[in-house]
Amino acid sequence: ETVENFWKNGILDPDSNVQFGEGGAGTFSDGKLNTLVKDTFGRGKEVLSRFVEAGAPSEILYQQKPHLGTDQLVGIVQFMRHQIEEMGGEFRFRSTVTDLMIRDRKLNAVIVNAKEEIPAEICILAPGHSARDTFAMLEKHNINMEPKSFAVGVRVEHPQTMINQDLYGEPENDRLGASSYKVTHTLENGRGVYSFCMCPGGYVVNASSEEGMLAVNGMSYQARDSHNANSAIIVTVNPSDFPEEGVLGGIALQRKLERAAWEAGKGKIPVQLFKDYCTHQKSTRLGDVIPCIKGAYTLTDVRSIFPKEIGDSIEAGIHAFGKKLSGFDRPDALLEGVESRTSSPVRIVREPKKLTSNIEGIYPCGEGAGYAGGITSAAMDGIKVAEAVASVYALPVNKM
Ligand SMILES: Cc1cc2nc3c(=O)[nH]c(=O)nc-3n(C[C@H](O)[C@H](O)[C@H](O)COP(=O)(O)OP(=O)(O)OC[C@H]3O[C@@H](n4cnc5c(N)ncnc54)[C@H](O)[C@@H]3O)c2cc1C
């Protein structure tokens, strides 16, 4: 409800948005379930089986690129909550962990909403990649973290029929559905530019989580039936791009870009035609590509958001992709900014076997801690951490 309200009226709830709230970033995601992580221990298979148990179609168990869509995910996440509650788990909405009590390098308690103290020996810390307040709190406690490379850029929109035409040889194919692509290119300046989180028949969404800052992402419904294909076109940035800012330097860079994006669109998603992006001109009218966007948008200058090298790299990348996929660099392709939450800008260091941080009892986990890059890999990491916790704390079977 809060997410729909934000997309309709622009009223942001910093605790309940595309990044935060029930199901985390996964709930309003696109629901692509494929992962590049090898399934050596069967955790990936287990994740998919749990999705089916919670209402996902059983095809996801054998499809090469399983996909759920936002509309299915919302119900699946609620079902999983009920399952956990039936097993004795408790969910507390509107409850932010604001601090940790640490004694003799061991976790003692977690503090919720800056007032309630919950005694705890174990905390599985899986706050997602946008938990900037949490990262700052961890730094204050000298919990080992390191900056890591991530990527920033824009969302690009093209007509889905154009992508289908290139890949299928026809604008539509009922059996194959909306087609998807993946494009990569290494630039002369050594940076990689690539497409990420491609959403066939999808929507670009306002995925902001902080006031005065704007970030975009992409999603689709299960039917993948909007008239556009979108993907993030992103350029790698590494700690040398933000050396002066320490461990949280990547977050400072994200915030700078998101503030610039908010300014460019005065709070609405900034949109620019590719031809205007190339000539550094504000867009004033759309061409044949009509946006599929959740949230208010405005035509403006997207390129002004980026430092020169990143802005130039995006342009060079899109020209290079035009040689691989016909029409990718068409003058009226739409660029929307800023895509800044592609992965976590930090890693919370964990001991490789015990999986704890330098503070006993704290188990960094999932994408925000730097150990996953998507829904399935984050869930697989969750299982891995649960196994590590169980190996230390589980009661022997005869005592249960
Ligand atoms: C629009 C969009 C589309 C995406 N599409 C895909 C896709 O198609 N496929 C894919 O694999 N991935 C996709 N992703 C990425 C995917 O959603 C994430 O990789 C995944 O959700 C990471 O899981 P996680 O559990 O590590 O973190 P999250 O899902 O981010 O969950 C973190 C949770 O921690 C909570 N939290 C944070 N800080 C605190 C605190 N201090 N106290 C209490 N709670 C806190 C948050 O509210 C949230 O519920 C998409 C993301 C977005 C935003």
Image (tube, grey):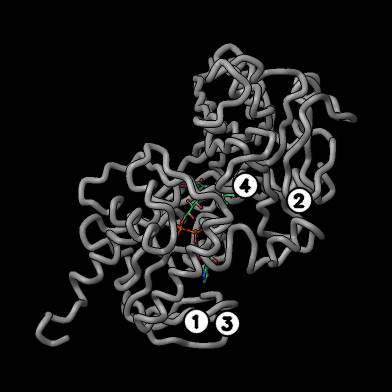
Q: Amino acid at mark 2?
A: Gly
Frontmost residue, 258 versus 206? 206
Q: Residue at x 84, y 29 (%)?
A: 286
Q: Decide: few, some or many residues near mark 1? Use Cα within 10 Å; few <14, some 14-19, many ≥20.
A: some
Label 1 – label 4 distance at C-alpha: 27 Å
The residue at 36%/84% (across/down) is 88
Circle 4 residues within 10 Å: few <14, some 14–19, many ≥20? many
Dot 1: element: strand
Which sits earlier in the primary sequence, circle 1 or circle 4?
Answer: 1
For ligand 1, tell me if the residue under mark 2 lies within 8 Å: no
Answer whether residue 371 is visible to the viewer in this image: no
Contact between marks 1 and 3 (CB within 8 A): the answer is yes
**Decide: marks 3, 4 in contact (CB < 8 A)?**
no
Vertical position of residue 339 compared to residue 191: above or below:
below
Mark closest to the chain's N terminus, 3 or 2:
3
Query: Disc 2 designates what residue?
Result: 295
Residue 180 x/y as whole percent: 53, 30
Name the front one of labels 3 and 2: 2
- Left or right: residue 378 versus residue 361 is right
User: Contact, CB < 8 Å: mark 2 with mark 4?
Assistant: no
Q: Who comes first in sequence, dot 3 or dot 4?
A: 3
Mark-to-mark CA distance, 1 and 3 = 6 Å
Name the residue that disc number 1 marks.
111
Q: Return the mark for residue 114.
A: 3
Q: Disc 3 beta carbon < 8 A from ligand 1?
A: no
Marker disc for residue 255: none
* Nearer mark to the viewer, of 1 and 2: 2
In the picture of the structure, the residue carrying the numbered disc 4 is 254
Q: Earlier in the sequence, mark 2 or mark 4?
A: 4
